[in-house]
Structures are given as C-alpha cells and as structure tokens.
Amino acid sequence: MSSIFLLLQRVHDLVHDLPMKLNYSKPKIYTGGVDIHQWSKLTKKEQKEALSKFWYVYYSYRNPKTGKLVRQTNIKGGANQYKDKKSRYYVLKMLKEGLEIVLQDGFSPYDKNVSLEEYIKQKLDKKPSTKTKNNIVKETVFVNNSTEQKEIILSIEDALALVLKTKKKILNQNSYPKFKSRVNRFNNWLLENGFVLQDCITTVTKKDVIKYLNSVLERTSPRNRNNARVDISSFYQVLVDNDFIQDNFIKKINVLKAIPERNKTYKPSQLSKILEYLKSEDPILDLFVKFISYNTLRPIEVCRLKIGDLDLLDNKLYVRAKNKPVKVKIIPDIMAKELTGLKKKNSELLLFTPNEIGGTWETDESNRRDYFTKRFKKVKDHFGLGKDYGLYSFRHTYITKMYRELAENLTPNEAKSKLMIITGHATMSALDKYLRDIDAILPEDYSNLLE
C-alpha cells in the first residue's frame, strides 16, 4: 500500500478547525473516463476498459507567480493495484478527502521546503486524534509521556479468520458448521460483487448486507434469509466485542415474517400401520422412533445418546438438549422393558448405529441424524407420505396423545403442568405455544352453538 495513501487516510480522520483557502480547485477522482455512479449500467466490456486505465486523484493549485490555477501531479496512492471498481474507488475516495483537508489546512505544492508527505507527517505529529470514521477503530498508545495514534484496520480476510476461530471455540459441533457455511456464502457473495479479501471490513455497508439478504430471499425463503441475518449479525458482534468496529448495524436490519415449517401429527390409523411396519421390517429404526415418542426427544438428541446415558437400574435417561447441557428424564416402563439387553454393553458405545444397538460410528451427530431421516424416508415412501411427515411427527403425535389423555380428568392448566415435566419445556408459555402450533388443543363439539 502506498505511504501517501496511509498518510492521507489518517489526515482524513483528523478533527480540527480549518482555515478557508481559495488557492486550489477541489480534488476530483478520475475513474477511467466513465461516470462511477452509473457503473452498474455499463456493459462488462465498458467496465473492463475503464479498469484497464489508471485511476487517480487530480487537482489544480494557483501558481503564486502567475495567479492562474495549474494542474498538479496526479495522485494514485496504489489504488490501481486493485482490479475491481469498489476497492479502487474506496482508496481514491480516502485520498481525495484527505488531500482536501490538507489543502484547506494550508499546504501548497509550490512550497519547496516541504513535500506533501513531509507536510502530512508534521501535522500528524502535532495533532493526534481519537476520532473514528467508517467504524475504523483507533487506539492511542502512550510512549514517553506522549501519545501516538495507531489505526487498527481489519481486512475482510482477517475478519473472517478471527470470527471463525472465535466461534469454533464457542459453538457446538452441530451449530458451528452451519454458521461457517452461512458466513462463507456471504464472503463468496462479496467477492463476486466487487470486493477483495484485502478490503477493510468496514467497506462492507448495511446496504451491501441488505442486497445479499435479498439475494438469499429470492433464491430460497424468508426463513433462510432470517437465519443468514442472524449469523451475519453474530459475525459482526464478534468484531464489536473485540473492538475492531463500533457498531453492529446488522441488528438494525428488519426480520421478515416467516411461516414455520412443522411436521404434521399422524392420524391414529396411520400411526398403527407405521408402528406395525417398523416392528417387523426395521427393529433399529423402531426403537429409535420409540425414544422420540415415549421420551419426547428430538431426533438429534436420540443420536447423541450413548449406552452410559441410560441408567437402567433407576430408569433414568441423561441427554444433552439444545437448551441446557444435560437434562434428566425418566425411562417409562413401557420403554424400559425393551432395553434390558443393554446392561452388559460398553458405556462409551453409541446407542444407535446403522447396523446395531450399541456400537461405534465415526461420524458427527448431524450426519447421524440425517442418516436416520433418510432411513425413515423409505418408510414414508412405502405409505405414500409426503414432506409434511417425518420423525418429528412422532414427537408431536405422542405429546398430543398425552395431553388429551390428561385433559380428560384435569383442568387445562393442571394437564399442562403435568405434561411440561414430561416434555421438558422450560416455561408454561413455551409449552402452550407448542401445543397450539401442533393443534393438540381442540375445542369440544360446538354444534349447539350453531343451531
């Protein structure tokens, strides 16, 4: 990077009173002979031709002898090493704004005693600043009772490396790959849209992120767009927490309304046929489904289970849930009698593997969950069930069944209080919302209201 660029960029951020000078023309940027504001309307050929030329900042200064404005030497500042419009224009814009401040402050190219670079260095030594611009963080370092201003400019490439390294330590093995995938897709979009890895992360604006989120929405769904927003916001929050930027502007981007996708509950006739089929055709998947049904576990939670997580003497089940490290559930008698053969198994073995109950399987829990989802699809295909049904449908079905059994002899609040202990919902309102979402709560016949 050119030293004149770094100096003028620092000058651009200085805050001080500037005397008016009329001995120069306002600096301008030459962008290859095209209007930079019409860039998106240019053809690829026109853009390529413009980028093939040198871009620079130019200005005129009044000759003290003739009194006429004279064009001065162009300032490129290393901008032309970049082969894309956005990076090149960003560098030149900083040069232009910094140069204008220097000219306002009194610099004259006709002063033979000091060059532009020397003039800038003198001013910076005299006037350190603590102001930040464009979300670039500056730190003040104290040396020998004096202060020296130091900028911390983080590139897109370094920001990505920092955030992924940080998140890998924080997120679990299921969440981190999803976060990394979404952030990498955002990074790839930036590169495809004129950014380069060496650009300062602060060159990415709120408008750029909105454009990306709109592209996700057009390509997929509101839900995926909102998920992308959450992870990009998390990305920027790491930079805020590490004092590289001042504000997480992603939080100011709106969340779209997205209709949640839920598996349907099975009808009684469907359920009996599926359970009969699983018992005779796929005993491993049959037991997998029973853990979802009887213990109201999510498929990913079943995939985490090891033999040692089952206390078959006290009929307790220890499982890592998504909302807390470990939760304890009872193993109902209807389930316990099918697990007696596991007492002699090694406690470190996974409970479920493709070919046996209690074995080894060298893959992560997400892949294990996906495997059993695909394995159950064969059952769905056998019964002609569509995408609205899945392994989650068993959880919804059995929670609905238990609630309606409880509600026959208890008030709604009493029924939900007992059910909440079984399902593991943290609050009554969370359980209430869940029951409404799966249509577990239905009114009694209201024909008398229609007569």
Image (cartoon, helix red, strand yellow):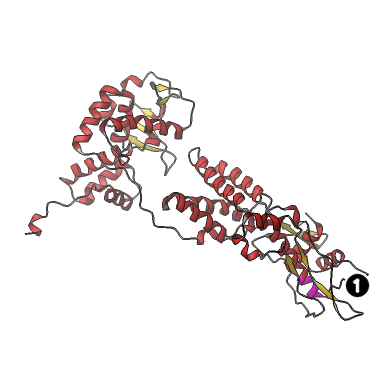
Q: Position of residue 188 (x, y in %)?
A: 58, 47
50 left or right, relative to 246: right
Instruction: Tell me, yes or no, if residue 138 can be seen here.
Output: no
**Quadrant where the image shows the C terminus:** bottom left
Task: Please name the amino acid that badge 1 sits on.
Answer: Asp
- Residue 124 is inside the magenta segment: no
Q: Residue at x 24, y 39 (%)?
A: 266
Of residues 395 and 253, the one drawn nearer to the viewer in this rendering: 253
Residue bearing the label numbered 1: 111
Q: Residue at x 42, y 51 (%)?
A: 223
Helix, strand or loop at mark 1: loop
Of residues 207 and 305, the one drawn nearer to the viewer in this rendering: 207
181 left or right, relative to 309: right
**Segment tinted magenta in the rendering:** 100-112
Q: Residues within 10 Å of mark 1 (few under 14, many from 20)?
A: few
**Quadrant where the image shows the N terminus:** bottom right
Q: Quadrant of residue 69?
A: bottom right
Of residues 9 and 234, the one drawn nearer to the viewer in this rendering: 9
Q: Position of residue 72 (x, y in %)?
A: 84, 69
Count the labels in the image: 1
Q: Name above or below for residue 367 compared with residue 238.
A: above
Instruction: Tell me, yes or no, if residue 83 can be seen here.
Output: yes
Q: Quadrant of residue 95?
A: bottom right
